[in-house]
Image (spheres, rainbow, N blue to C red):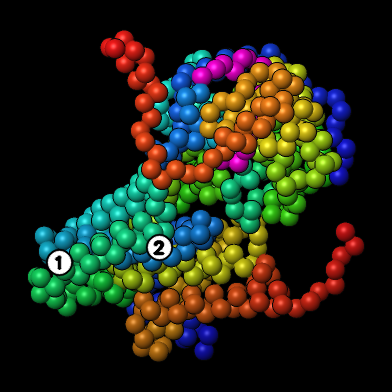
Amino acid sequence: MFYDVFVAPFLDYPFMRRALVGALATAVAGGPLGVLLTLRRMALAGDALSHAILPGVAIGFLVAGLSLPAMTLGGFIAGLVVALASGAAARFSEQREDASLAAFYLVSLALGVTIVSLKGSNVDLLHVLFGSALALDDAALFLLAGAATVTLFALAGFLRAFAVDTLDPVFLRRASPFGEYMPFLFLALVVLNLVAGFQALGTLMAVGLIMLPAAGARLWTHDLTLTLLLAGGLGALSAYAGLVLSFHAGAPAGPSIILAAGGVYFISLGFGRAGGLINNLRPRRHLEG
Amino acid sequence: MEAVATTLIPARSPGVRPAAIKLENLTLGYDRRPAVHHLSGEIAPGELLAVCGPNGGGKSTLLKALAGLLQPMGGSIERGGARARDFAFLPQAAQFDRSFPISVQEFVALGALRRKGIFGRIDAAETESVERAIAAVGLKGFEPHALGQLSGGQLQRALFARLMVEDGAVILLDEPFGAIDAATTGDLLAIIAGWHAEGRTIVAALHELDLVRRGFPKTLLLAREVIAWGETDEVLSPKNLTLARAMAKAHDADAAYCHRDETNERADVL
Protein backbone atom coordinates (compact mmCIF):
# COMPACT_ATOMS: atom_id res chain seq x y z
CA MET A 1 0.00 0.00 0.00
CA PHE A 2 2.67 2.51 1.08
CA TYR A 3 4.90 1.26 -1.71
CA ASP A 4 2.16 1.51 -4.32
CA VAL A 5 1.24 5.07 -3.38
CA PHE A 6 4.59 6.66 -2.63
CA VAL A 7 7.32 4.69 -4.41
CA ALA A 8 5.91 2.74 -7.35
CA PRO A 9 5.03 5.77 -9.55
CA PHE A 10 8.66 6.81 -9.62
CA LEU A 11 10.03 3.30 -10.19
CA ASP A 12 7.52 2.43 -12.89
CA TYR A 13 7.56 5.61 -14.96
CA PRO A 14 10.75 7.35 -16.14
CA PHE A 15 8.87 10.60 -16.78
CA MET A 16 7.93 10.69 -13.07
CA ARG A 17 11.58 10.25 -12.08
CA ARG A 18 12.60 13.08 -14.39
CA ALA A 19 9.84 15.32 -13.05
CA LEU A 20 10.99 14.56 -9.50
CA VAL A 21 14.63 15.39 -10.26
CA GLY A 22 13.66 18.64 -12.00
CA ALA A 23 11.30 19.75 -9.26
CA LEU A 24 13.79 18.86 -6.51
CA ALA A 25 16.49 20.95 -8.18
CA THR A 26 14.11 23.91 -8.44
CA ALA A 27 13.02 23.52 -4.82
CA VAL A 28 16.44 23.11 -3.21
CA ALA A 29 17.84 26.28 -4.80
CA GLY A 30 14.61 28.26 -4.89
CA GLY A 31 13.71 27.95 -1.20
CA PRO A 32 16.80 29.74 0.18
CA LEU A 33 16.45 32.44 -2.49
CA GLY A 34 12.84 32.91 -1.42
CA VAL A 35 13.90 33.35 2.22
CA LEU A 36 16.19 36.22 1.21
CA LEU A 37 13.38 37.69 -0.93
CA THR A 38 10.98 37.69 2.04
CA LEU A 39 13.67 39.24 4.27
CA ARG A 40 14.13 42.00 1.69
CA ARG A 41 10.34 42.52 1.69
CA MET A 42 10.36 41.61 -1.96
CA ALA A 43 8.00 38.64 -1.66
CA LEU A 44 6.00 39.92 -4.62
CA ALA A 45 9.06 40.81 -6.69
CA GLY A 46 9.51 37.16 -7.70
CA ASP A 47 6.01 37.17 -9.12
CA ALA A 48 6.68 40.42 -10.97
CA LEU A 49 9.92 39.07 -12.45
CA SER A 50 8.23 35.85 -13.53
CA HIS A 51 5.93 37.98 -15.69
CA ALA A 52 8.83 40.08 -16.87
CA ILE A 53 10.64 37.17 -18.56
CA LEU A 54 7.66 36.55 -20.87
CA PRO A 55 8.67 38.71 -23.85
CA GLY A 56 12.15 37.13 -23.83
CA VAL A 57 10.71 33.64 -23.90
CA ALA A 58 8.29 34.65 -26.66
CA ILE A 59 11.03 36.22 -28.80
CA GLY A 60 13.23 33.15 -28.27
CA PHE A 61 10.32 30.98 -29.41
CA LEU A 62 9.66 33.12 -32.50
CA VAL A 63 13.31 33.13 -33.53
CA ALA A 64 14.19 29.49 -32.93
CA GLY A 65 10.89 27.65 -32.41
CA LEU A 66 10.48 25.34 -29.46
CA SER A 67 14.17 25.52 -28.59
CA LEU A 68 14.97 25.39 -24.90
CA PRO A 69 18.30 27.26 -25.11
CA ALA A 70 16.78 30.08 -27.20
CA MET A 71 13.76 30.53 -24.93
CA THR A 72 15.88 30.26 -21.78
CA LEU A 73 18.38 32.81 -23.03
CA GLY A 74 15.60 35.14 -24.14
CA GLY A 75 13.80 34.86 -20.81
CA PHE A 76 17.04 35.34 -18.87
CA ILE A 77 17.92 38.48 -20.82
CA ALA A 78 14.41 39.94 -20.49
CA GLY A 79 14.34 39.22 -16.74
CA LEU A 80 17.80 40.72 -16.23
CA VAL A 81 16.92 43.85 -18.22
CA VAL A 82 13.80 44.42 -16.12
CA ALA A 83 15.61 43.68 -12.84
CA LEU A 84 18.60 45.89 -13.68
CA ALA A 85 16.58 48.72 -15.19
CA SER A 86 14.12 48.88 -12.29
CA GLY A 87 16.97 48.57 -9.76
CA ALA A 88 18.89 51.37 -11.49
CA ALA A 89 15.76 53.53 -11.70
CA ALA A 90 15.21 53.09 -7.96
CA ARG A 91 18.85 53.84 -7.21
CA PHE A 92 19.34 56.92 -9.35
CA SER A 93 15.88 58.50 -9.41
CA GLU A 94 13.64 59.29 -6.49
CA GLN A 95 11.29 56.44 -7.34
CA ARG A 96 11.05 53.61 -4.82
CA GLU A 97 12.01 50.10 -5.90
CA ASP A 98 8.50 48.61 -5.66
CA ALA A 99 7.02 51.28 -7.91
CA SER A 100 9.80 51.08 -10.51
CA LEU A 101 9.68 47.28 -10.58
CA ALA A 102 5.89 47.33 -11.06
CA ALA A 103 6.25 49.80 -13.91
CA PHE A 104 8.96 47.86 -15.72
CA TYR A 105 7.41 44.42 -15.35
CA LEU A 106 3.99 45.62 -16.54
CA VAL A 107 5.52 47.09 -19.69
CA SER A 108 7.51 43.89 -20.18
CA LEU A 109 4.41 41.72 -19.72
CA ALA A 110 2.39 43.81 -22.17
CA LEU A 111 5.24 43.55 -24.67
CA GLY A 112 5.27 39.76 -24.25
CA VAL A 113 1.52 39.41 -24.78
CA THR A 114 1.74 41.68 -27.84
CA ILE A 115 4.50 39.61 -29.40
CA VAL A 116 2.61 36.36 -28.80
CA SER A 117 -0.65 37.77 -30.23
CA LEU A 118 0.89 39.37 -33.31
CA LYS A 119 2.38 36.06 -34.39
CA GLY A 120 -0.83 34.14 -33.71
CA SER A 121 -1.34 32.18 -30.54
CA ASN A 122 0.43 28.88 -30.48
CA VAL A 123 -0.52 25.87 -28.41
CA ASP A 124 3.12 24.81 -28.03
CA LEU A 125 4.03 28.19 -26.63
CA LEU A 126 1.17 28.06 -24.15
CA HIS A 127 2.56 24.71 -23.07
CA VAL A 128 5.82 26.40 -22.28
CA LEU A 129 4.20 29.21 -20.37
CA PHE A 130 2.28 26.81 -18.17
CA GLY A 131 5.01 24.21 -17.86
CA SER A 132 5.32 20.55 -18.71
CA ALA A 133 6.84 18.88 -15.69
CA LEU A 134 6.05 15.43 -17.06
CA ALA A 135 7.93 16.01 -20.32
CA LEU A 136 11.38 17.07 -19.14
CA ASP A 137 14.13 16.02 -21.54
CA ASP A 138 17.85 15.76 -20.78
CA ALA A 139 18.53 19.35 -21.78
CA ALA A 140 15.83 20.64 -19.43
CA LEU A 141 17.18 18.56 -16.55
CA PHE A 142 20.71 19.81 -17.12
CA LEU A 143 19.42 23.35 -17.18
CA LEU A 144 17.52 22.90 -13.91
CA ALA A 145 20.42 21.16 -12.18
CA GLY A 146 22.91 23.71 -13.55
CA ALA A 147 20.87 26.65 -12.34
CA ALA A 148 20.45 25.04 -8.92
CA THR A 149 24.19 24.38 -8.66
CA VAL A 150 25.15 27.93 -9.62
CA THR A 151 22.57 29.31 -7.19
CA LEU A 152 23.69 27.18 -4.24
CA PHE A 153 27.37 28.01 -4.76
CA ALA A 154 26.60 31.71 -5.16
CA LEU A 155 24.47 31.68 -2.02
CA ALA A 156 27.18 29.89 -0.06
CA GLY A 157 29.82 32.36 -1.21
CA PHE A 158 27.85 35.58 -0.97
CA LEU A 159 25.51 34.79 1.94
CA ARG A 160 27.17 37.31 4.24
CA ALA A 161 27.03 40.03 1.61
CA PHE A 162 23.41 39.24 0.72
CA ALA A 163 22.43 39.25 4.41
CA VAL A 164 24.15 42.57 5.18
CA ASP A 165 22.76 44.09 1.99
CA THR A 166 19.30 43.13 3.22
CA LEU A 167 19.85 44.36 6.78
CA ASP A 168 21.76 47.59 6.21
CA PRO A 169 22.54 48.35 2.54
CA VAL A 170 24.06 51.78 3.25
CA PHE A 171 26.57 50.17 5.63
CA LEU A 172 27.52 47.44 3.15
CA ARG A 173 28.11 49.93 0.34
CA ARG A 174 30.43 51.91 2.59
CA ALA A 175 32.27 48.89 3.99
CA SER A 176 32.87 46.97 0.77
CA PRO A 177 33.55 48.02 -2.82
CA PHE A 178 31.35 45.11 -3.95
CA GLY A 179 28.38 46.22 -1.84
CA GLU A 180 26.97 48.25 -4.69
CA TYR A 181 26.57 45.18 -6.91
CA MET A 182 24.96 42.78 -4.44
CA PRO A 183 21.32 43.70 -5.20
CA PHE A 184 21.92 43.09 -8.89
CA LEU A 185 23.73 39.78 -8.37
CA PHE A 186 20.89 38.66 -6.13
CA LEU A 187 18.20 39.59 -8.65
CA ALA A 188 20.18 37.84 -11.38
CA LEU A 189 20.01 34.63 -9.32
CA VAL A 190 16.26 35.05 -8.90
CA VAL A 191 15.82 35.52 -12.65
CA LEU A 192 18.03 32.48 -13.35
CA ASN A 193 15.86 30.30 -11.15
CA LEU A 194 12.62 31.60 -12.60
CA VAL A 195 13.84 31.00 -16.14
CA ALA A 196 15.10 27.51 -15.32
CA GLY A 197 11.87 26.70 -13.53
CA PHE A 198 9.55 27.72 -16.36
CA GLN A 199 10.20 24.47 -18.20
CA ALA A 200 9.17 22.35 -15.23
CA LEU A 201 6.44 24.43 -13.68
CA GLY A 202 5.69 27.21 -16.15
CA THR A 203 6.74 30.83 -15.92
CA LEU A 204 3.79 31.69 -13.74
CA MET A 205 4.23 28.76 -11.33
CA ALA A 206 8.01 28.69 -10.90
CA VAL A 207 7.76 31.50 -8.40
CA GLY A 208 5.52 29.33 -6.17
CA LEU A 209 8.31 26.88 -5.38
CA ILE A 210 10.54 29.84 -4.47
CA MET A 211 8.15 31.77 -2.24
CA LEU A 212 5.80 29.26 -0.54
CA PRO A 213 8.43 27.06 1.19
CA ALA A 214 10.35 30.20 2.18
CA ALA A 215 7.32 31.90 3.70
CA GLY A 216 6.52 28.67 5.56
CA ALA A 217 10.09 28.10 6.80
CA ARG A 218 10.25 31.55 8.38
CA LEU A 219 7.35 30.58 10.65
CA TRP A 220 9.34 27.78 12.28
CA THR A 221 12.62 29.43 13.33
CA HIS A 222 14.27 32.84 13.76
CA ASP A 223 17.71 31.42 12.93
CA LEU A 224 18.72 32.47 9.41
CA THR A 225 20.83 29.41 8.59
CA LEU A 226 18.11 27.02 9.75
CA THR A 227 15.49 28.97 7.82
CA LEU A 228 17.50 28.67 4.60
CA LEU A 229 17.95 24.90 5.02
CA LEU A 230 14.34 24.39 6.07
CA ALA A 231 13.03 26.31 3.05
CA GLY A 232 14.95 24.02 0.69
CA GLY A 233 13.70 20.98 2.62
CA LEU A 234 10.06 22.06 2.66
CA GLY A 235 10.30 22.80 -1.05
CA ALA A 236 11.68 19.33 -1.77
CA LEU A 237 8.91 17.79 0.32
CA SER A 238 6.31 19.80 -1.58
CA ALA A 239 7.77 18.75 -4.93
CA TYR A 240 7.59 15.08 -3.98
CA ALA A 241 4.13 15.30 -2.41
CA GLY A 242 2.81 17.30 -5.35
CA LEU A 243 4.00 14.76 -7.89
CA VAL A 244 2.46 11.85 -5.90
CA LEU A 245 -0.77 13.84 -5.72
CA SER A 246 -0.78 14.62 -9.41
CA PHE A 247 -0.06 10.98 -10.32
CA HIS A 248 -2.94 9.53 -8.33
CA ALA A 249 -5.44 12.33 -8.95
CA GLY A 250 -4.56 12.72 -12.62
CA ALA A 251 -4.00 16.43 -11.96
CA PRO A 252 -1.46 18.58 -13.85
CA ALA A 253 1.96 18.28 -12.22
CA GLY A 254 3.02 21.94 -11.94
CA PRO A 255 -0.09 23.24 -10.15
CA SER A 256 -0.15 20.09 -7.95
CA ILE A 257 3.37 20.83 -6.72
CA ILE A 258 2.42 24.42 -5.94
CA LEU A 259 -0.77 23.27 -4.17
CA ALA A 260 1.30 20.86 -2.06
CA ALA A 261 3.65 23.74 -1.21
CA GLY A 262 0.58 25.77 -0.31
CA GLY A 263 -0.54 23.00 2.04
CA VAL A 264 2.88 23.00 3.71
CA TYR A 265 2.63 26.78 4.04
CA PHE A 266 -0.82 26.66 5.68
CA ILE A 267 0.39 24.02 8.16
CA SER A 268 3.34 26.29 8.99
CA LEU A 269 1.06 29.30 9.33
CA GLY A 270 -1.07 27.39 11.82
CA PHE A 271 1.52 25.47 13.81
CA GLY A 272 4.82 27.29 13.17
CA ARG A 273 6.68 27.74 16.46
CA ALA A 274 8.20 31.08 15.50
CA GLY A 275 5.15 33.23 14.93
CA GLY A 276 2.51 30.76 13.68
CA LEU A 277 -1.14 31.46 14.52
CA ILE A 278 -1.55 29.03 17.43
CA ASN A 279 1.77 30.03 18.94
CA ASN A 280 0.99 33.71 18.60
CA LEU A 281 -2.59 33.73 19.82
CA ARG A 282 -2.32 31.26 22.71
CA PRO A 283 -1.42 33.10 25.90
CA ARG A 284 1.60 31.58 27.60
CA ARG A 285 2.93 32.20 31.10
CA HIS A 286 5.49 34.94 31.21
CA LEU A 287 9.03 34.33 32.41
CA GLU A 288 10.76 35.91 35.36
CA GLY A 289 13.29 37.87 33.34
CA MET B 1 23.39 45.67 32.08
CA GLU B 2 27.00 46.27 33.04
CA ALA B 3 28.36 49.72 33.71
CA VAL B 4 30.32 51.15 30.84
CA ALA B 5 33.99 50.40 31.18
CA THR B 6 35.65 53.46 32.61
CA THR B 7 39.01 52.63 31.14
CA LEU B 8 39.14 53.29 27.43
CA ILE B 9 39.52 50.33 25.17
CA PRO B 10 42.89 50.61 23.48
CA ALA B 11 42.69 51.69 19.86
CA ARG B 12 43.23 48.78 17.48
CA SER B 13 45.48 50.99 15.44
CA PRO B 14 47.27 53.20 17.96
CA GLY B 15 47.99 56.66 16.65
CA VAL B 16 45.21 56.86 14.03
CA ARG B 17 46.14 59.85 11.90
CA PRO B 18 43.09 61.35 10.22
CA ALA B 19 43.70 64.05 7.61
CA ALA B 20 42.11 67.50 7.66
CA ILE B 21 38.76 67.82 5.91
CA LYS B 22 38.48 70.99 3.83
CA LEU B 23 35.12 72.39 2.73
CA GLU B 24 35.46 74.79 -0.19
CA ASN B 25 32.44 76.99 -0.99
CA LEU B 26 30.24 73.93 -0.49
CA THR B 27 26.58 74.08 -1.51
CA LEU B 28 24.37 71.07 -0.83
CA GLY B 29 20.70 70.47 -1.35
CA TYR B 30 17.88 68.64 -3.01
CA ASP B 31 16.14 69.51 -6.25
CA ARG B 32 18.25 72.68 -6.73
CA ARG B 33 17.14 74.04 -3.33
CA PRO B 34 20.19 74.62 -1.14
CA ALA B 35 20.09 73.10 2.36
CA VAL B 36 23.67 74.17 3.02
CA HIS B 37 24.71 77.33 1.21
CA HIS B 38 28.31 78.34 0.38
CA LEU B 39 30.04 76.70 3.32
CA SER B 40 33.82 77.02 3.59
CA GLY B 41 36.10 75.91 6.37
CA GLU B 42 38.38 73.21 7.69
CA ILE B 43 37.84 70.39 10.15
CA ALA B 44 41.24 69.81 11.72
CA PRO B 45 42.60 66.27 12.31
CA GLY B 46 41.41 64.92 15.65
CA GLU B 47 38.76 67.60 16.05
CA LEU B 48 35.59 66.88 18.04
CA LEU B 49 33.04 69.01 16.22
CA ALA B 50 29.31 69.43 16.88
CA VAL B 51 27.11 70.62 14.02
CA CYS B 52 24.16 72.53 15.50
CA GLY B 53 21.29 74.57 14.19
CA PRO B 54 17.54 74.66 13.71
CA ASN B 55 15.61 71.85 12.04
CA GLY B 56 16.10 72.13 8.30
CA GLY B 57 19.34 73.99 8.88
CA GLY B 58 21.36 71.43 6.92
CA LYS B 59 23.01 69.38 9.72
CA SER B 60 22.09 65.95 8.33
CA THR B 61 22.66 67.14 4.78
CA LEU B 62 26.23 68.15 5.62
CA LEU B 63 26.93 64.78 7.27
CA LYS B 64 25.51 62.89 4.30
CA ALA B 65 27.76 64.85 1.99
CA LEU B 66 30.82 64.20 4.19
CA ALA B 67 29.90 60.49 4.04
CA GLY B 68 29.69 60.70 0.24
CA LEU B 69 25.99 59.86 0.11
CA LEU B 70 25.08 63.20 -1.45
CA GLN B 71 26.91 64.91 -4.33
CA PRO B 72 27.62 68.62 -3.81
CA MET B 73 25.61 71.04 -5.98
CA GLY B 74 28.59 73.34 -5.88
CA GLY B 75 32.01 73.62 -4.29
CA SER B 76 34.00 70.66 -3.02
CA ILE B 77 34.98 68.49 -0.06
CA GLU B 78 38.68 67.70 0.24
CA ARG B 79 39.27 64.61 2.38
CA GLY B 80 43.05 64.59 2.34
CA GLY B 81 43.39 61.45 0.22
CA ALA B 82 40.75 59.46 2.09
CA ARG B 83 37.71 58.16 0.17
CA ALA B 84 34.25 59.20 1.34
CA ARG B 85 33.41 55.62 2.24
CA ASP B 86 36.46 55.39 4.51
CA PHE B 87 34.61 57.58 7.00
CA ALA B 88 32.60 55.58 9.55
CA PHE B 89 29.02 56.87 9.44
CA LEU B 90 26.09 56.46 11.81
CA PRO B 91 22.95 57.62 10.00
CA GLN B 92 20.08 59.30 11.83
CA ALA B 93 17.70 56.78 13.45
CA ALA B 94 19.42 53.88 11.68
CA GLN B 95 17.14 52.93 8.85
CA PHE B 96 17.30 49.17 8.93
CA ASP B 97 14.87 46.32 9.42
CA ARG B 98 15.13 45.35 13.07
CA SER B 99 13.25 42.10 12.57
CA PHE B 100 16.19 40.73 10.55
CA PRO B 101 17.38 37.51 12.21
CA ILE B 102 20.86 38.47 13.46
CA SER B 103 22.39 38.33 16.94
CA VAL B 104 23.98 41.30 18.71
CA GLN B 105 27.36 39.56 18.45
CA GLU B 106 27.02 39.09 14.67
CA PHE B 107 25.75 42.62 14.21
CA VAL B 108 28.69 44.22 16.03
CA ALA B 109 31.09 41.95 14.12
CA LEU B 110 29.89 43.59 10.87
CA GLY B 111 32.25 46.42 11.80
CA ALA B 112 35.11 44.11 10.76
CA LEU B 113 33.69 43.83 7.23
CA ARG B 114 35.84 46.77 6.13
CA ARG B 115 39.05 44.88 6.88
CA LYS B 116 37.94 41.31 6.20
CA GLY B 117 35.79 41.93 3.14
CA ILE B 118 32.63 40.05 2.29
CA PHE B 119 34.38 36.67 2.16
CA GLY B 120 37.01 36.94 4.90
CA ARG B 121 36.87 34.91 8.09
CA ILE B 122 36.40 36.77 11.37
CA ASP B 123 39.60 35.62 13.12
CA ALA B 124 40.42 35.46 16.84
CA ALA B 125 41.75 39.02 16.95
CA GLU B 126 38.54 40.38 15.41
CA THR B 127 36.39 38.27 17.73
CA GLU B 128 38.27 39.74 20.64
CA SER B 129 37.79 43.31 19.44
CA VAL B 130 34.07 42.56 19.01
CA GLU B 131 33.88 41.27 22.59
CA ARG B 132 35.76 44.32 23.88
CA ALA B 133 33.48 46.70 22.01
CA ILE B 134 30.33 44.97 23.32
CA ALA B 135 31.68 45.19 26.87
CA ALA B 136 32.70 48.84 26.40
CA VAL B 137 29.16 49.91 25.42
CA GLY B 138 27.68 47.96 28.34
CA LEU B 139 25.96 45.21 26.39
CA LYS B 140 27.88 42.30 27.89
CA GLY B 141 25.56 39.30 28.20
CA PHE B 142 23.43 40.41 25.25
CA GLU B 143 25.70 38.81 22.61
CA PRO B 144 23.34 35.92 21.70
CA HIS B 145 20.19 38.07 21.80
CA ALA B 146 18.44 38.94 18.56
CA LEU B 147 18.91 42.52 17.42
CA GLY B 148 15.13 42.97 17.39
CA GLN B 149 14.94 42.29 21.14
CA LEU B 150 17.02 45.34 22.02
CA SER B 151 15.43 48.57 23.25
CA GLY B 152 16.10 51.83 21.42
CA GLY B 153 18.94 52.78 23.76
CA GLN B 154 20.49 49.32 23.60
CA LEU B 155 20.34 49.39 19.81
CA GLN B 156 22.21 52.69 19.82
CA ARG B 157 24.83 51.07 22.10
CA ALA B 158 25.15 48.20 19.62
CA LEU B 159 25.63 50.68 16.77
CA PHE B 160 28.39 52.42 18.78
CA ALA B 161 30.03 49.02 19.35
CA ARG B 162 29.95 48.41 15.59
CA LEU B 163 31.61 51.82 15.05
CA MET B 164 34.31 50.80 17.56
CA VAL B 165 35.04 47.63 15.59
CA GLU B 166 35.10 49.67 12.37
CA ASP B 167 38.00 51.56 13.92
CA GLY B 168 37.60 54.57 11.60
CA ALA B 169 39.96 57.55 11.76
CA VAL B 170 37.00 59.80 10.97
CA ILE B 171 33.59 59.13 12.55
CA LEU B 172 30.38 60.88 11.46
CA LEU B 173 27.40 60.72 13.84
CA ASP B 174 23.97 62.00 12.79
CA GLU B 175 21.85 62.76 15.90
CA PRO B 176 23.44 59.93 17.94
CA PHE B 177 21.36 60.76 21.05
CA GLY B 178 17.94 60.94 19.44
CA ALA B 179 15.24 59.35 21.64
CA ILE B 180 17.55 57.76 24.25
CA ASP B 181 17.63 58.29 28.01
CA ALA B 182 20.10 60.34 30.06
CA ALA B 183 22.07 57.36 31.36
CA THR B 184 22.67 55.97 27.87
CA THR B 185 23.50 59.43 26.55
CA GLY B 186 26.09 59.84 29.31
CA ASP B 187 27.68 56.48 28.47
CA LEU B 188 27.80 57.26 24.75
CA LEU B 189 29.29 60.71 25.41
CA ALA B 190 32.05 58.99 27.39
CA ILE B 191 32.74 56.70 24.43
CA ILE B 192 32.94 59.71 22.09
CA ALA B 193 35.37 61.39 24.51
CA GLY B 194 37.45 58.19 24.36
CA TRP B 195 37.56 58.32 20.55
CA HIS B 196 38.61 61.97 20.77
CA ALA B 197 41.45 61.04 23.14
CA GLU B 198 42.61 58.44 20.62
CA GLY B 199 43.03 61.16 18.01
CA ARG B 200 40.05 60.39 15.80
CA THR B 201 38.15 63.17 14.00
CA ILE B 202 34.50 63.18 15.09
CA VAL B 203 31.71 65.22 13.52
CA ALA B 204 28.28 64.93 15.14
CA ALA B 205 24.97 66.57 14.21
CA LEU B 206 23.17 67.50 17.43
CA HIS B 207 20.20 69.63 18.40
CA GLU B 208 20.53 69.56 22.21
CA LEU B 209 22.79 72.46 23.11
CA ASP B 210 23.37 71.21 26.68
CA LEU B 211 25.01 68.08 25.31
CA VAL B 212 27.10 70.12 22.89
CA ARG B 213 28.40 72.30 25.74
CA ARG B 214 29.08 69.18 27.83
CA GLY B 215 31.03 67.12 25.36
CA PHE B 216 32.07 69.06 22.26
CA PRO B 217 34.93 71.61 22.26
CA LYS B 218 34.19 72.91 18.73
CA THR B 219 30.85 73.80 17.16
CA LEU B 220 29.59 74.71 13.71
CA LEU B 221 26.29 76.61 13.95
CA LEU B 222 24.46 76.08 10.68
CA ALA B 223 21.15 77.55 9.50
CA ARG B 224 21.60 76.91 5.78
CA GLU B 225 24.30 79.60 5.96
CA VAL B 226 27.13 79.43 8.49
CA ILE B 227 26.20 81.47 11.55
CA ALA B 228 29.42 80.77 13.44
CA TRP B 229 32.19 78.16 13.54
CA GLY B 230 34.74 77.85 16.33
CA GLU B 231 35.00 77.34 20.09
CA THR B 232 31.68 76.05 21.43
CA ASP B 233 31.32 78.71 24.14
CA GLU B 234 31.72 81.54 21.65
CA VAL B 235 29.62 79.97 18.91
CA LEU B 236 26.62 79.22 21.13
CA SER B 237 26.16 82.83 22.25
CA PRO B 238 22.59 84.15 22.67
CA LYS B 239 23.16 86.51 19.75
CA ASN B 240 24.22 83.72 17.38
CA LEU B 241 21.35 81.46 18.48
CA THR B 242 18.79 84.22 17.84
CA LEU B 243 20.33 84.78 14.43
CA ALA B 244 20.14 81.04 13.66
CA ARG B 245 16.44 80.92 14.56
CA ALA B 246 15.72 83.91 12.36
CA MET B 247 17.54 82.29 9.42
CA ALA B 248 15.34 79.20 9.50
CA LYS B 249 12.95 80.83 7.09
CA ALA B 250 10.11 79.36 5.11
CA HIS B 251 10.40 77.71 1.72
CA ASP B 252 10.35 80.37 -1.01
CA ALA B 253 8.46 79.05 -4.04
CA ASP B 254 9.76 81.85 -6.26
CA ALA B 255 13.41 81.67 -5.16
CA ALA B 256 15.60 83.21 -7.84
CA TYR B 257 18.89 81.78 -9.09
CA CYS B 258 21.79 82.27 -6.72
CA HIS B 259 24.42 84.54 -8.26
CA ARG B 260 26.84 84.64 -5.38
CA ASP B 261 29.58 82.68 -7.15
CA GLU B 262 29.45 85.16 -10.04
CA THR B 263 30.01 88.32 -8.00
CA ASN B 264 33.79 88.23 -8.21
CA GLU B 265 33.76 87.72 -11.96
CA ARG B 266 31.26 90.56 -12.34
CA ALA B 267 33.42 92.81 -10.24
CA ASP B 268 36.22 92.14 -12.68
CA VAL B 269 34.02 92.98 -15.64
CA LEU B 270 32.52 96.13 -14.22
Q: What residue is drawn where x is 59% and y is 78%?
A: A267
Mark 1 closeness class: few <14, some 14–19, many ≥20 residues within 10 Å: some
One can see residue A140 in this view: no
User: Left of A117 or right of it: where is A19?
Assistant: right
The label on residue A201 is none
Decide: marks 1, 2 in contact (CB < 8 A)?
Answer: no
Q: What residue is drawn where x is 54% and y is 75%?
A: A265
**Residue B55 covered by magenta stretch:** yes
Q: Nearer the viewer, residue A63 or B17?
A: B17
Above or below: residue A274 compared with residue A270 = above
Tell me the quarter of the picture where residue A255 sits: bottom left
**Extreme residue toward the left, this view:** A119
Above or below: residue B49 compared with residue B131 = above
Above or below: residue A254 compared with residue B20 = below
Q: Which residue is mark 1?
A: A115
Q: What residue is drawn where x is 79% and y is 38%?
A: B185
Screen quadrant of the N terminus of chain B: top right
Q: Which residue is mark 2?
A: A46
Q: Nearer the viewer, residue A131 or B50?
A: B50
Mark 2 closeness class: few <14, some 14–19, many ≥20 residues within 10 Å: many
User: Left of A225 or right of it: where is B32?
Assistant: left
Above or below: residue A225 compared with residue B217 = below
